[in-house]
Image (cartoon, rainbow, N blue to C red):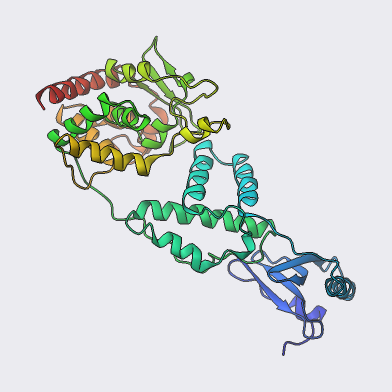
Amino acid sequence: MPNSLTDFSIRCLVPPATGTVTAWDGSLKGFGVRVSQGGTKTFIVLIDSGRRQAIGRWPMLPLAKARIEARRLLAEKTLGKIRPVHTAFDDAKAEFLEACARKNRARTVEDYRRLLNRHFPYERTSVGSIGGRDILRRLAKLAGTPSEQHHAFTAARAFFRWCVRQEIIERNPMEKMEVPSNGASRDRILSDDELAAIYSTARTGSSPLHRIIALLILTGQRRGEIAHIEWDWFNRKTATLTFPARITKNRREHIIPLGELAASILDITPLQIGSPYVFPAARSIAKGKPTTVYNGWGKDKIAFDKELVSKGHEIASWRLHDLRRTVASGMAALHVPQTVVEKLLNHLSGGTLSPIAQVYNRHSYLAEMRAAIGMWEARLANAEAGS
């Protein structure tokens, strides 16, 4: 049986390495002190299964007064005056995303929204009733896509940690889980025939994913950045596309030239009234909600692969990110200088420029990138014609 709490025993409580620990009072069941990782010590009372109410912080609130308040709350619980608090997953998720929007990039918030909506559809389930075993079961379904599994784990962990900080739940159900592997590094480069088949299918299709894939092949950009394109970023007069710093991986504005083929893809993409995005999410449009960016990657990629097969092109084990690697390799084969390729792909480090040169070399390389894009589009056109 635990000993009764004293000021001395509270003073001696050691903060945990992570999360929180609770020391319970031996003389008053349901009353205790929660110690956070940072050393904060808070009196709490257990007033419902999984629901612990904070009373105040020690030593600002003396132990004797905290115990009196705990007795009062426990008496109200016995009399039925305290009702269980139900915080639905969707309600907590909405607050979490709103909090993220105040400090994170828009792309991060959209990624969190997509991952939580798709892989954790708890809807009106109480956050406090979601257990670790159910989360593990949902993550296990993503074992075949290690990268998506890793991202889903990261989003869920961020959400439940936030819930603990907001005292929506007392304990993070993921606190003891191991982070899943992000998958082995890939080196897949598509052959000329494979690239021609994918490009031809993408260029002649009309769905958002068809056009996104075409732009990935024509520009070499990241899929998340292409999916987030807004109409204001596209300057038809200068044939450029400007990615703002808030959306890029390295948080720097990125301007790329567009060849005629890439610009024509944007020219034929229909404008969705009321949405700033070139590729808005279909569901938000259908339901008349504020639009978010395209997020139909999984099912649309499966449909795209089936279309390839129907045209006699069965391309094994390829991913959208392989297109970026293939573009870089293809430009190198065209003798485009590596510095120009890195500028086009928006690589900040690990390239041909030293860290010092990356800081002081402000040359945009726009003309060089435009020349490289011209050669690349010509090669794609020739490959498509010969396929």
Residue 255 image offset from top left, x and y in percent: 40, 23
Residue 313 vertical position relative to residue 373 in the rendered view, above or below: below
Q: Is residue 283 left or right of residue 86?
A: left
Residue 19 image offset from top left, x and y in percent: 61, 66
**Residue sitting nearer the eye, 80 or 291:** 80
**Residue sitting nearer the eye, 293 or 82:** 82
Residue 47 vertical position relative to residue 148 in the rendered view, above or below: below
Q: Is residue 147 left or right of residue 186?
A: right
**Residue sitting nearer the eye, 35 or 130:** 130
Residue farthest to the top?
A: 237
User: Measuring 38% from the left and 11% from the top, which residue is drawn there?
Assistant: 238
Question: Where on the picture, by quarter, is residue 310?
Answer: top left
Residue 307 image offset from top left, x and y in percent: 23, 36
Quarter in which the N terminus is drawn: bottom right
Is any atom of residue 343 visible in this view? Answer: yes
User: Measuring 60% from the left and 44% from the top, which residue is drawn there?
Assistant: 97
Question: Where on the picture, by quarter, is residue 65?
Answer: bottom right
Q: Is residue 263 left or right of residue 120?
A: left
Residue 271 image offset from top left, x and y in percent: 45, 19
User: Measuring 16% from the left and 36% from the top, which residue is drawn there?
Assistant: 194
Question: Where on the picture, by quarter, is residue 288?
Answer: top right
User: Measuring 50% from the left and 42% from the top, which residue is drawn there?
Assistant: 108
Quarter in which the C terminus is drawn: top left
Residue 70 vertical position relative to residue 264 in the rendered view, above or below: below
Is any atom of residue 325 visible in this view? Answer: no
Residue farthest to the bottom?
A: 1
Q: Is residue 14 left or right of residue 232?
A: right
